[in-house]
Image: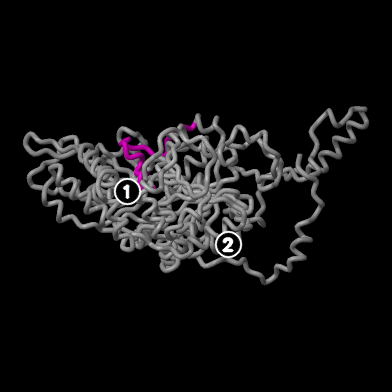
């Protein structure tokens, strides 16, 4: 039952606040955290952090260039042409979230429903007619056998390299396109786009897992890692406020120790209650691996499975979310996990365990720069949309109309402005604003909070209430409150008067109204963001024996339901399944 609340009216609150002339306070855009679902920081008992691209931000494009060159060298070493050494990384080309179609060798920008928004083959951006020819209805189903989703920041050099290799073979006079457009051929040698992709993918795995890339990065850490002076301040404030902090990364201990020593000093473990390396997310959120302790002197794993209590200053390897939450006695809503990987960090922690989630989107800094500096383009697009509406409004059209308004020039103008906007973001456009891009929908669905850096939390008090903005549907945002609906047969219900009429009838008939019909509730029934006793949402099955605690009930609670998770399956990100799990050994 909800606790009884004293009656208060909105008018009384507004009168007391004296809101006239006041503006909503907003922090600097570079310091802001953006909200999809409301969250109260003081309710968070555990702050979890990924390392790569979260605590350790890589310098761009320096790090992408390093990886790109190393993968090119690997391809040459396994037999690809020496001419590949001429490839030069262009950081304005790739954008996260592109699909690679292994059948036709195209990089595709796709919305959340499979509709193709843009296509590029090698360095050639495809015309709408070319896309229509290969993809009827400009639609492609997400299939693991055909599509690989380049979703991570580590995929950026790989995305551009795929375009380079496809462009090289398509442009080479020694190779001719195959009749079915699935690759190129030179004599008896066939180079399918699928085999090209598999070679690139294997080379990327080798560079990240088996080469000296990590050692080289640590040796030149100042060149490739941004040292954020806000990090120690943020972690210290969290711990002094009574919360626990933990590190959960897929990287091995040696690499983690090298980067964290640079960022936080040799005593970096003192900033965390628990540190877990070799996590192998997203597997960590499912069955996991053997949970072992790391010898911090040698970096070796100690034999046997660790079952004792977790101690600060120690480092652990592997394990699973089940083991972890039982040992620290954490419930799902107690944890805010902060990471950059939409699938490995945010989606799985949300769907499988009901953790609260904070997505780090480094590209957001550039997206907001374009949003503010190129506002004139957005204003032009808004004005053109008004003109489009007027073209139909002034004709007073209904279903009997035969004469269409002439809008060809208007449509062309909208396309040109849209293209100018896209090019401000990069060759492949915006990460968020090209239609309802799949990555954008995943951010809205699974990330409670998001920002360009986890350090932005330092600008908020740790009791802050992040409130999600009101989201209006089209029937609400496009209909003025002052408008008349125009349906005399439809009226607003007044439940109070309905109850009074029914009560009079029941009284006359001698019927007990409490058992005859439902009546209008007299207290507030909406329980979102309302504190209540909640013991069944725990990710720890043993937590039901612990004392009850007040928590916040979220509208997103269903997303942590095992039933819902088993029904929906893992369909958000698919691709070739190498040993290098979803580009996450570096995360």
Of callouts 2 and 1, which one flags the residue occurring earlier in the amino acid sequence?
1
Which is more toward the observer, 178 or 495? 178
- The colour scheme used here is one colour
Q: In which quarter of the image is the N terminus?
A: top right
Q: Nearer the viewer, residue 361 or 537?
A: 537
Q: In which quarter of the image is residue 463?
A: bottom right
Q: In this view, does 293 lie to the left or right of 45?
A: left
At x 56% / y 38%, what residue is drawn? 327
**Crowd rating for badge 2 (residues with CA inside 10 Å; few <14, some 14–19, many 20+):** some
Residue 569: in magenta span: yes
Q: Which numbered circle lies on residue 231?
A: none
Q: Is the magenta stretch mostly helix, strand or loop?
A: loop
Q: Position of residue 274 (x, y in %)?
A: 50, 47
Residue identified by numbered label 1:
155
Q: In this view, does 492 lie to the left or right of 243?
A: right
The residue at 59%/55% (across/down) is: 469
Mark 2 vs mark 1, CA separation in Å: 32 Å
Q: Can residue 347 be seen in this view?
A: yes
Q: Nearer the viewer, mark 2 or mark 1?
A: 2
Picture quadrant where residue 289 is located: top left
- Residue under the point 35% across and 50% down: 255
Query: Which segment did they paint magenta?
Result: 568-587
Label pair 2/1, CB-CB below 8 angstroms: no
Residue placed most toward the observer, 394 or 139: 139
Q: Which residue is drawn at 36% across and 41% down?
A: 582
In the displayed structure, does residue 214 sit left or right of residue 199?
A: right
Q: Using residue 140 as the reference point, say whether residue 325 is left or right of it.
A: right
- Residue 299 position, x and y percent, is 37, 45
Q: What element carries label 2?
A: loop
């Amino acid at each position: 039952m909800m606790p009884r609340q004293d009656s208060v009216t909105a008018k009384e609150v507004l009168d007391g606040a004296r809101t006239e002339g006041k503006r909503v306070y907003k922090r600097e855009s570079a310091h802001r955290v953006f909200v999809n679902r409301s969250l109260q920081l003081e309710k968070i008992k555990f702050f979890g952090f990924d390392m790569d691209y979260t605590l350790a931000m890589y310098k761009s494009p320096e790090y992408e260039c390093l990886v790109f060159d190393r993968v090119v060298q690997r391809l040459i070493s396994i037999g690809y042409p020496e001419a590949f050494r001429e490839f030069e990384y262009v950081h304005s080309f790739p954008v996260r979230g592109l699909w690679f179609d292994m059948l036709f060798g195209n990089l595709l920008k796709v919305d959340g429903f499979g509709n193709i928004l843009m296509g590029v083959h090698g360095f050639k951006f495809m015309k709408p007619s070319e896309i229509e020819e290969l993809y009827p209805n400009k639609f492609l189903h997400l299939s693991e056998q055909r599509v690989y989703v380049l979703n991570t920041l580590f995929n950026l050099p790989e995305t551009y390299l795929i375009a380079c290799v496809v462009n090289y073979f398509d442009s080479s006079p020694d190779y001719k396109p195959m009749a079915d457009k699935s690759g190129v051929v030179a004599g008896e040698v066939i180079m399918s786009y699928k085999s090209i992709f598999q070679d690139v993918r294997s080379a990327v795995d080798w560079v990240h897992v088996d080469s000296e890339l990590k050692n080289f990065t640590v040796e030149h850490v100042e060149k490739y890692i941004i040292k954020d002076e806000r990090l120690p301040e943020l972690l210290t404030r969290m711990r002094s406020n009574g919360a626990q902090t933990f590190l959960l990364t897929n990287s091995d201990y040696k690499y983690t120790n090298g980067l964290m020593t640079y960022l936080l000093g040799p005593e970096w473990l003192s900033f965390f209650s628990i540190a877990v390396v070799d996590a192998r997310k997203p597997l960590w959120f499912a069955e996991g691996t053997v949970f072992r302790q790391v010898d911090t002197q040698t970096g070796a794993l100690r034999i046997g499975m660790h079952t004792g209590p977790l101690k600060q200053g120690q480092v652990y390897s592997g394990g699973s979310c089940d083991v972890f939450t039982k040992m620290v006695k954490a419930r799902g809503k107690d944890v805010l996990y902060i990471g950059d990987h939409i699938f490995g960090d945010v989606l799985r922690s949300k769907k499988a365990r009901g953790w609260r989630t904070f997505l780090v989107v480094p590209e957001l800094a550039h997206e907001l720069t374009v949003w503010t500096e190129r506002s004139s383009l957005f204003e032009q697009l808004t004005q053109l949309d008004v003109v489009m509406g007027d073209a139909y409004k002034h004709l007073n059209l209904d279903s009997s109309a035969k004469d269409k308004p002439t809008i060809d020039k208007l449509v062309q103008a909208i396309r040109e402005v849209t293209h100018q906007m896209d090019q401000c973001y990069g060759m492949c456009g915006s990460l968020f604003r090209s239609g309802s891009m799949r990555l954008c929908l995943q951010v809205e669905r699974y990330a409670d909070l998001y920002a360009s850096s986890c350090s932005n939390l330092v600008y908020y008090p740790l009791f802050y209430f992040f409130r999600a903005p009101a989201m209006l549907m089209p029937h609400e945002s496009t209909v003025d409150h002052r408008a008349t609906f125009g349906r005399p047969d439809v009226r607003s219900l007044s439940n109070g008067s309905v109850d009074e009429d029914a009560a009079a009838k029941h009284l006359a008939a001698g019927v007990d109204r409490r058992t005859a019909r439902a009546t209008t509730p007299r207290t507030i029934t909406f329980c979102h963001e309302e504190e209540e006793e909640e013991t069944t949402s725990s990710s720890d099955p043993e937590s039901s024996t612990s004392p009850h605690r007040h928590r916040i009930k979220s509208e997103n609670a269903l997303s942590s339901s095992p039933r819902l998770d088993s029904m929906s399956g893992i369909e958000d990100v698919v691709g070739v399944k190498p040993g290098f799990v979803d580009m996450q050994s570096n995360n």
